[in-house]
Amino acid sequence: MNIWLDDQRKAPEGWLHLHNIEEVEQLIESTHDLKDFHIDIMSFDFHLSHPKDGIDVMVYLAKLCSKSNTSRFWPKTVRYHSNDPKGVEVMRDFVISFEKEILPKHKNIKGKAFNKLF
């Protein structure tokens, strides 16, 4: 599944278009028990017309992975399409830390290293 997170720009053809964290939460809730569910690519906008931004969605997905003791809710590939270079930098830094320090080291991704990210 490819997910486009953006409140204004149209999603590319064939991508699931989600506009805010609530829609992401609804998707995860509806697919949580499907063992074959995974996100191939997720492209993030930083600013959403919502109190929570793209980085908040990333933190939500990371915490969900920790709580569920799985990496299947984390996108295999993360992309950015935000016009805000500082927002992209914040998201990119989070992704680098999460993917470098947490995902490869632990099947059980709970623990000190994960908690340092939050």
Image: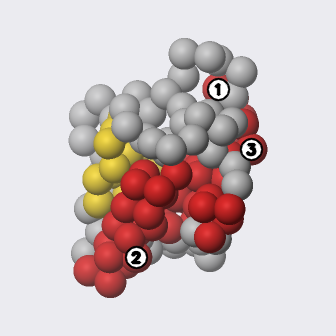
Pick the quarter of the image with the C terminus: bottom right
Decide if residue 33 is on the left or right side of residue 9: right
User: Which amino acid does the dot numbered 1 rest on?
Assistant: Thr
Q: Given the image, on which type of amino acid does mark 3 rest?
A: Lys
CA distance for labels 3 and 1: 15 Å
Residue 67's label in the rendered image is: 3
Q: Which residue sits at x=69%, y=49%?
A: 110
* Disc number lying in front (1 or 2): 2
Mark 2: amino acid: Val
- Quadrant of the image occupied by residue 117: bottom right
Nearest the eye: 52 or 59: 59
The residue beneath circle 1 is 31
Which of the pair 44/16 is nearer the observer?
Answer: 44
Which numbered tag is attached to residue 60? none
Q: Gap in Å between the C-alphas at discs 1 and 2?
A: 28 Å
- Residue 22: x %, y % from top left: 65, 53
The residue at which mark 2 appears reads as 90
Residue 98 position (above or below residue 104)? below
